[in-house]
């Protein structure tokens, strides 16, 4: 994928969190193909290095930061790497997340705190530190990862779903708060996507049943592919979406249309 040069992000400095796998990886690969200067970040050092090496071998300008988005100093380093290496940050994709499948009886207080820390606080922190640098320049584009479960109720997502409502809410509040500074903030709300995380579901209690049911609930009759979400993220991140802010865009095979 990284071979072509579409140029829709030519020369733009972009930070992608949770880039090692899944939607983050597909986004990093597409952004590289579109000419972005990348900072890829993840908590999984080994998988991140595999991605960094592959992108660099394809000729992309790429830097890697290992860290945990829920830790302020780590989140700050992810943004600062772009500022130090590329002179600023034009695009943030706040993608890093964990996706526990639990109902309210199974989810412990610790489970709630962990998903809120990574998916909620981590998104808040990376947006905060990115906006610190975007605001003085008067330009920037942020894309957050919400979900169908950040716009509607689902069973089995008692902790994860509310964390994704945080993503939808943060997107709208930051969009309004920073529009006057030239910063656009949008989100995508993917349906169920065939990422590394979702491929592991059949090994978990109730996971296969969840998957069988969820496929039937997507009118297009299949799971989405990470690349299909990455293309929507690219649109929102790029100047093609120059008059779009505060949107939570479903990429869901029609799930939310029902
Ligand atoms: N897969 C889906 O069906 C789906 C649907 C809707 C939304 N999403 C959202 O998309 C995003 C990516 O999901 P995915 O399915 O690609 O997941 P994934 O597990 O395949 O990839 C997530 C990546 O984030 C990294 N990560 C996890 N915790 C981190 C932390 N604390 N700090 C930094 N990096 C961390 C992981 O190491 C991994 O590389 C998440 O925000 C998720 O909520 C996914």
Image: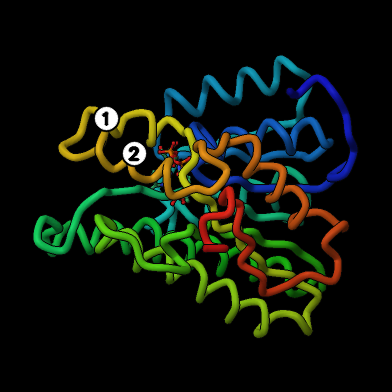
**Left or right: residue 115 compared with residue 29:** left
Residue 208 visible in the picture: yes
Query: Disc 1 versus disc 2: distance between alpha carbons?
Result: 8 Å
Q: In the depicted view, which residue is nearer to us: 205 or 1?
A: 205
**Which corner quadrant of the image does residue 152 belong to?**
bottom left
- The numbered mark at residue 66 is none
On screen, residue 168 versus residue 89, left or right, reads left
Does residue 62 sit above or below 100 in this rendering?
Answer: above
Which residue is disc 2 drawn over? 211
- Per the image, label 2 sits on a secondary structure element best described as helix
- Left or right: residue 5 versus residue 123 is right
Tell me the colour scheme of the image.
Answer: rainbow
Q: Position of residue 151 (x, y in %)?
A: 47, 68
- SS for dot 1: helix
Instruction: Examine the rendered structure and indicate whether residue 222 appears above or below residue 250.
Output: above
Which sits in the foreground, 14 or 206?
206
x, y percentage for residue 193?
49, 40
**Which residue: 11% across, 59% down?**
108
Q: Residue at x 53, y 46 (%)?
A: 17
For the residues labelled 1 and 2, say whether their Cβ atoms are less than 8 Å apart.
yes
Residue 65 shows in the view: no
Image location of residue 133, percent across then percent down: 69, 66
Q: Residue 45 appears in which quarter of the rendering?
A: top left
Quarter of the image with the N terminus in it? top right
Q: Residue at x 74, y 57 (%)?
A: 236
Q: Residue at x 77, y 45 (%)?
A: 86
Residue 207: x and y, percent?
25, 37
> Which residue is tagged 1?
202
Relative vertical location of residue 193 with respect to residue 138 in this rendering, above or below = above
Q: Nearer the viewer, mark 1 or mark 2?
A: 2
């Amino acid at each position: 994928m990284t071979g072509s040069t579409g140029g829709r992000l030519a020369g733009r400095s972009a930070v992608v969190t949770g880039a090692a796998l899944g939607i983050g990886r597909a986004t990093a690969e597409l952004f590289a193909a579109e000419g972005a200067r990348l900072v890829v970040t993840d908590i999984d050092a080994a998988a991140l290095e595999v991605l960094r090496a592959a992108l660099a071998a394809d000729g992309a300008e790429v830097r890697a930061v290992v860290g945990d988005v829920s830790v302020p100093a780590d989140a700050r380093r992810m943004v600062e790497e772009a500022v130090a290496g590329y002179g600023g940050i034009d695009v943030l994709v706040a993608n890093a997340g964990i996706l526990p499948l639990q109902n309210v009886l199974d989810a412990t207080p610790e489970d709630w705190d962990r998903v809120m820390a990574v998916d909620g606080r981590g998104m808040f922190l990376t947006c905060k530190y990115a906006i610190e640098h975007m605001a003085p320049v008067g330009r920037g584009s942020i894309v957050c990862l919400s979900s169908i479960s950040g716009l509607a109720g689902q069973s089995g997502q008692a902790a994860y779903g509310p964390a994704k409502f945080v993503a939808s809410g943060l997107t709208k509040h930051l969009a309004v708060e920073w529009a006057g500074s030239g910063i656009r903030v949008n989100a995508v709300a993917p349906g169920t996507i065939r990422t590394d995380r979702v491929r592991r579901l059949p090994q978990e209690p109730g996971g296969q049943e969840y998957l069988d049911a969820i496929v039937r609930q997507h009118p297009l009759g299949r799971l989405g592919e990470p690349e299909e979400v990455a293309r929507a993220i690219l649109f929102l991140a790029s100047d093609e979406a120059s008059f779009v802010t505060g949107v939570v865009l479903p990429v869901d095979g029609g799930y939310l249309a029902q």
